[in-house]
Image (tube, rainbow, N blue to C red):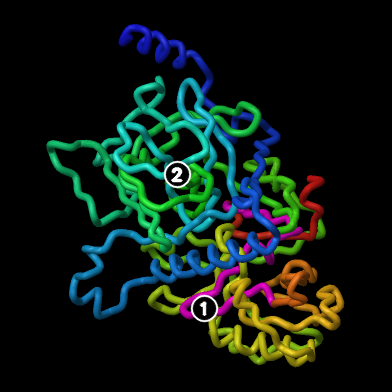
């Protein structure tokens, strides 16, 4: 058995090692599917699940807020493991190991670590749609040293190097109670139609709690060194989410294939807080919101980062409904309600707070004002289906946004039917309307 593994390893050394920059001048195209398209859910059930998921995600984002000065003075921050936002909105299929084992993972722009359930053995694993990945069955699995730069990139104060265990232990917890605990290792990943990348650092999770909604783990696409984007060395990626009600796949482009037209608008990424758990997020500068023809009286400071790293406005793939800081949401909700001019209705069954009773139960007859987000250098005009959620059975139309305290998030519902390009080298987010299913 050992000699066969050695022979396979020797043969692998003869194969070319690909990175996105050298694998193809065209880059890579992957397909994303919404987490709920793989289940037999009604339209209303999908909305309810999206709302629940958004609230969990928001709680996770807030849990990753910088510690208070009092906590820093007491030393409590050193004893707290990293808490990350729950992430289970869009799923991506890939393969891990040699021979390649197909797995499904959550794509998450709000975190860095790539991880999967791991049979090494797996002491605690939640149900997943594919067989468990077993390191012993792969010829390309390798442990990461505790003192390596990859291990240091975890920035996890919970673990320290010790002589008996030279490996790199990790622990990630998410805002919804999901957690993964295991060892950092490197492996070969197969992406798209057969592009192979070697030596990708990932978390081999042997003690896992919670769930990642019909998937085996997470593929982090954040701004930190352990994200897939950073490890591949690509300078850009893009995605285009198909409409929420559509079961068609959404394209994800990695590398040179991520392009937009010359008419696309662009806004710079805002500087991230130095270090800490929020350094992975993609911050934007939101300067204002227009409802109808009126620029709302919202102080731009509401959306800005504080000196301590709190607040701010991020774009996120894992939050379905845009969450606005409470002071901004109240102003927006009042403006929309005043212009719609219909009786309010309960949206509790949808998890949404601003809803209207449709005339004669016809939700399409609810006339909503136009909605524009004004970013630094770019205006994002949202189509109706990107901010109005309808329950036609109940005759209710709702604003597809929620309120939160502490920060604001541009959710995936508001990103649908829009092609977004993350220019990592230039530090710019570009976007333009698109028929995502036809890209």
| Placement of 57 over or under 217, stated as above or below | below
**Can residue 268 be seen here?**
no
Query: Which picture quadrant has residue 46?
Result: bottom right
Residue pictured at 60% horizontal, 50% vertical: 35
| Placement of 66 over or under 139, stated as above or below | below
Identify residue for label 2.
114
Q: Position of residue 361 (x, y in %)?
A: 82, 78
Residue pictured at 37% horizontal, 36% vertical: 118
**Can residue 152 be seen here?**
yes
Residue pictured at 19% horizontal, 44% vertical: 161
Q: Position of residue 439 (x, y in %)?
A: 79, 45
Answer whether labels 1 and 2 touch (C-beta < 8 Å): no
* Secondary structure state at the residue bearing disc 1: strand
| Placement of 147 over or under 265, stated as above or below | above
Q: Position of residue 213 (x, y in %)?
A: 52, 50
Q: Which mark is residue 104?
A: none
Q: Which mark is residue 404?
A: 1
* Secondary structure state at the residue bearing disc 2: loop
* Nearer to us in this view, 370 or 127: 127
Point out the stretch of residues depicted in magenta: 399-424
Residue pictured at 45% horizontal, 42% vertical: 127
């Amino acid at each position: 058995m050992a000699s066969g593994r050695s022979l396979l390893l020797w043969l692998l050394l003869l194969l070319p090692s690909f990175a996105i920059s050298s694998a193809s001048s065209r880059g890579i195209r992957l397909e994303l599917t919404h987490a709920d398209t793989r289940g037999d859910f009604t339209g209303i059930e999908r909305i309810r699940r999206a709302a629940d998921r958004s609230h969990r995600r928001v709680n996770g984002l807030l849990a990753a807020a910088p510690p208070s000065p009092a906590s820093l003075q007491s030393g409590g921050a050193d004893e707290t493991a990293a808490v990350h936002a729950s992430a289970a909105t869009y799923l991506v299929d890939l393969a891990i190991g040699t021979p390649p084992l197909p797995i499904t993972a959550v794509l998450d722009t709000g975190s860095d670590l790539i991880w999967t359930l791991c049979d090494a053995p797996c002491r605690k694993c939640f149900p997943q749609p594919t067989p468990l990945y077993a390191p012993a069955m792969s010829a390309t699995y390798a442990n990461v040293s505790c003192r390596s730069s990859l291990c240091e990139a975890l920035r996890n104060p919970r673990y320290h190097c010790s002589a008996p265990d030279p490996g790199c232990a990790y622990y990630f917890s998410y805002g919804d109670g999901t957690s993964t605990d295991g060892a950092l290792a490197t492996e070969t990943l197969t992406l798209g139609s057969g592009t192979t990348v070697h030596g990708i650092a990932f978390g081999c999770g042997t003690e896992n709690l919670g769930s990642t909604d019909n998937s085996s783990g997470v593929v982090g696409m954040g701004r930190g060194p352990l994200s897939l984007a950073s490890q591949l060395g690509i300078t850009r990626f893009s995605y285009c989410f198909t409409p929420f009600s559509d079961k068609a796949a959404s394209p994800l482009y990695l590398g040179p294939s991520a392009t937009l037209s010359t008419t696309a608008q662009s806004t710079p990424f805002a500087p991230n807080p130095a270090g800490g758990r929020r350094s992975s997020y993609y911050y934007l500068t939101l300067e204002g919101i227009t409802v109808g023809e009126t620029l709302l009286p919202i102080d731009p400071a509401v959306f800005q980062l504080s000196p301590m790293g709190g607040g701010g406005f991020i774009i996120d793939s894992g939050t379905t409904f845009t969450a606005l800081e409470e002071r901004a949401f109240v102003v927006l909700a009042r403006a929309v309600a005043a212009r719609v001019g219909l009786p309010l209705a309960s949206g509790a069954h949808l998890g949404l707070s601003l809803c209207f009773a449709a005339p004669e139960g016809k939700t399409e007859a609810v006339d909503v004002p136009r909605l524009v987000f004004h970013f630094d250098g770019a205006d994002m005009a949202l189509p109706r289906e990107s901010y109005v959620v309808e329950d036609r059975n109940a005759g209710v139309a709702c604003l597809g946004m929620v309120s939160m305290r502490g920060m604001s998030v541009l959710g995936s519902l508001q990103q649908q039917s829009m092609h977004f390009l993350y220019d990592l080298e230039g530090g710019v987010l570009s976007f333009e309307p698109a028929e995502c299913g036809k890209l």
